[in-house]
């Protein structure tokens, strides 16, 4: 019986426009639940949803036929409408763009929080460099060829 098997897990992060703080602590659980519902209704799996007052993190599973930009566009559009109604603030908007990082199945299992080491009051701008560092393998863990002077390539020790 032919079938397709996949494990496509992504960590997505995006912020409010101008990184303005919109989400008070008591509102966040409702926002996170709503975002998870949009993902599920779009055919994805919401493993975890979190964030702070100015940005959100999504740990999501997708099918091979899903298109990440399309899903993020739907999540942002639907949640933006809902946030405007719930907070009664028509000026709310998400920032253009987003960060997306692939996550291994074992990495997804051990993620205790979506953004380890970032305090609840931290801003999106402060957390993104940390996410980039976490997303890239260290040379000690995964030696990559390093360019030498003159263009020759050497292996890291």
Image: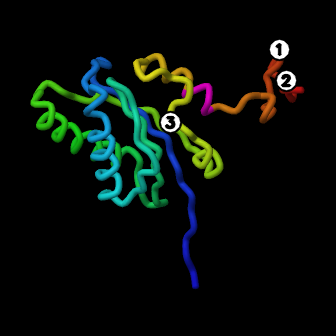
Please report contact status of discs 1 and 3: CB closer than 8 Å, yes or no: no
Determine the CA span between mark 3 and mark 2: 39 Å
Please report contact status of discs 3 and 2: CB closer than 8 Å, yes or no: no
Q: Would you name the residue on which mark 2 appears?
A: 152
Label 2 crowd (10 A; few <14 / some 14-19 / many >=20):
few
Name the foreground residue: 106 vs 100.
106
Farthest residue, direction front: 26
Q: Quadrant of residue 78?
A: top left
Q: Would you name the residue on which mark 1 appears?
A: 149
Label 1 crowd (10 A; few <14 / some 14-19 / many >=20):
few
Determine the CA span between mark 1 and mark 2: 7 Å
Label 3 crowd (10 A; few <14 / some 14-19 / many >=20):
many
Determine the CA span between mark 1 and mark 3: 39 Å
Q: Would you name the residue on which mark 3 appears?
A: 114
Q: Is residue 95 visible?
A: no
Farthest residue, direction right: 157
Q: Say whether residue 136 is magenta.
A: no
């Amino acid at each position: 019986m032919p079938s397709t098997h996949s494990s496509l897990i992504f960590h997505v992060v995006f912020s409010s426009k101008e990184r303005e703080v919109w989400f008070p602590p008591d509102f966040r659980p409702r926002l996170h639940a709503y975002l998870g519902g949009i993902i599920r209704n779009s055919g994805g799996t919401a493993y975890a949803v979190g964030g702070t007052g100015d940005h959100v993190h999504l740990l999501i599973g997708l099918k091979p036929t899903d298109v990440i930009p399309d899903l993020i566009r739907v999540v942002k559009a639907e949640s933006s409408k809902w946030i405007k109604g719930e907070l009664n603030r028509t000026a709310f908007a998400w920032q253009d763009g987003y960060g997306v990082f692939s996550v291994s199945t074992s990495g997804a299992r051990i993620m205790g929080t979506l953004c380890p080491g970032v305090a609840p009051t931290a801003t999106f701008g402060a957390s993104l460099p940390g996410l980039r560092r976490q997303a890239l393998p260290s040379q000690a863990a995964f030696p990559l060829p390093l360019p030498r002077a003159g263009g020759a390539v050497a292996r890291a020790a």
